[in-house]
Amino acid sequence: MNCEKCGGDMFPAKIFRLSGCLVSLGFLILVISLGCIGMVGFITLVGTGSSVAVSDEMEAEARASTLEELEEIKAPQAVIHEFAETAAVSPETLAGLSSDTRRDVERAVSSYSASLAGVAIGTGLFAFVGGTFAMVLFFASIPTLIVGFLLVLRKKIIQCADCGFYLDRA
């Protein structure tokens, strides 16, 4: 096909539909949206891993603290050994203790259970807040990603190699 203006050869090409400012804004929006989506993935992975690590660490600290407390109240070695292995004391073991010692052991074990409940609540709250933040960021990034793609759309043309004149291809 020959150019209407200069008679030169025309070739198929693609150009941006909108002005340079809007196209650069579109690329900026795309980069920011893709960065947000990547950050959501990173937050999800790191948040999950760190909450598991923290809860395991807190459980170990609570168990060690309870073992120290059992040693301070001079609980029998059988009670301390059973708690160290199972993180609980059986009712049969408690039945063989004096009333003061049994009360102190029950208080120490219930304190351990309360510590675990606190860790579970804290971990759950962290996961909820982090998950909510990640979901909001993700769902806000999707429409901006679409707008970015719309701003950088290209159109097909036939362009003159000599003078740059172009016609839209249908």
Image (spheres, helix red, strand yellow):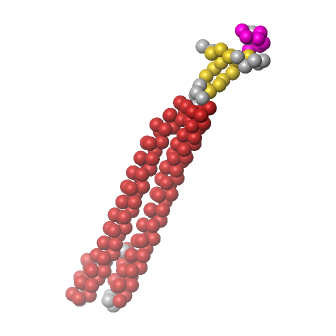
Q: Is residue 50 above or below residue 131?
A: below
Q: Residue at x 30, y 76 (%)?
A: 111
- Numbered marks: total: 0
Q: Please report the bounds of the magenta region as a residue range.
A: 4-11
In front of the other: 108 or 30? 30
Image quadrant where residue 92 sits: bottom left
Residue 156's place in the image compared with 137, above or below, is: above
Q: Is residue 76 rendered to the left or right of residue 161?
A: left
Residue at 41% over, 71% down = 59
Q: Main secondary structure of the magenta part?
A: loop
Residue situated in front as seen by the camera: 3 or 140: 3
User: Could you say where residue 78 lies in the image, as x and y percent from the top left?
Assistant: 35, 84
Residue 151 visible, this angle: yes
Quadrant of the drawing holding the N terminus: top right
User: Is residue 109 shown above or below 19?
Assistant: below
Is 122 placed left or right of 110 in the picture? right
Residue 82 shows in this picture: no
> Is residue 56 shown above or below 44?
below
Residue at screen point 37% across, 55% down: 128
Q: Position of residue 109 (x, y in %)?
A: 31, 77
